[in-house]
Amino acid sequence: MIPLRDNVPTRSFPVVTIGIIVVNALAWFWELGGRGVDSHVIKDGWYPCKIDGPCIELARHAALPWYENVFTSMFLHGSWEHIIGNMLFLWIFGDNVEDRMGHGRFIVFYVLCGVTAALVQTAFNPDSAIPMIGASGAVSGVLGAYILMFPHSRVLTLLPIFFFVQIIEVPAVILLGFWFVMQLLSGLGSLTRPEAGGGVAFWAHAAGFLAGMVLIGVFKKPERQAVEWWDNRAS
């Protein structure tokens, strides 16, 4: 299922959401130039094994220390599909979360979700010397916050069925809830068969989502907590 747009209007311009998308896009084109994507991933990706435990030579010679890589890795991607998917979800759901939190709070919230995702993935796979990259953990946090803030919203969704394509409206709780359950099940499967994950950090996705649900209580503006002004307009 590919989300296209939601039905929740915003009252402020999503300057931070757009800024994050622009930064990720610039970082992606920077990866494509010069030394190439693989070289940047090796240099600036997040290596779980760099915190504690054995680490292969490749990870030891990454350019930055682990406490810097945990941030740089959040703005790197490995393919066009990777960055387009992450930025699409951020564009659709991030503006509403930013609107409810405020611009400054949203920046801190986004980064904290990304860091939490990386650390939880490390806890489940501490010896991994495979560089972790992508905004998925931080974006997952946005999804977790969104599902609590706008439980009655609906998302226009592209649904490919074999050779046919349908566009349907899906409740956000179903769309995002299904996505979370798939990440959680895939993460559990990777505990017994790590190779089945195909290099995808499922635990980072699940952890980012849960972090967003928890942190929303801290970062949501108090004066807007009880305001569901958009419900009447969307119904």
Image (tube, rainbow, N blue to C red):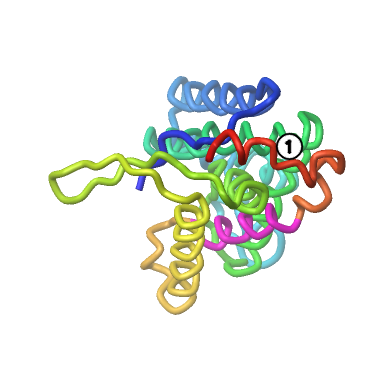
Magenta region includes residue 115: no
On screen, residue 163 versus residue 4, left or right, reads left
Q: Residue placed at 62% from the left, 51% from the top?
A: 60
Residue 156 drawn at (x, y percent): 40, 39
On screen, residue 69 versus residue 136, left or right, reads right
Residue 140 drawn at (x, y percent): 58, 49
Quadrant assignment, res 43: top right
Q: Residues within 10 Å of mark 1 (few under 14, many from 20)?
A: many
| Main secondary structure along the magenta-highlighted residues | helix
Q: Looking at the image, which residue sits at the far bottom? A: 192
Instruction: Give SS at disc 1.
Output: helix
Residue 218 drawn at (x, y percent): 83, 50
Q: Amino acid at mark 1?
A: Arg
Q: Which residues are magenta?
A: 201-214
Q: Residue placed at 39% from the left, 36% from the top?
A: 79
On screen, residue 197 versus residue 130, left or right, reads left
Toward the viewer: 24 or 56? 24
Vertical arrangement, residue 2 with respect to residue 14, above or below = below
Find disc 1 in the rendering and name its residue.
100
Residue 74 drawn at (x, y percent): 61, 40
Quadrant assignment, res 233: top right
Magenta region includes residue 205: yes
Q: Looking at the image, which residue sits at the far right? A: 222
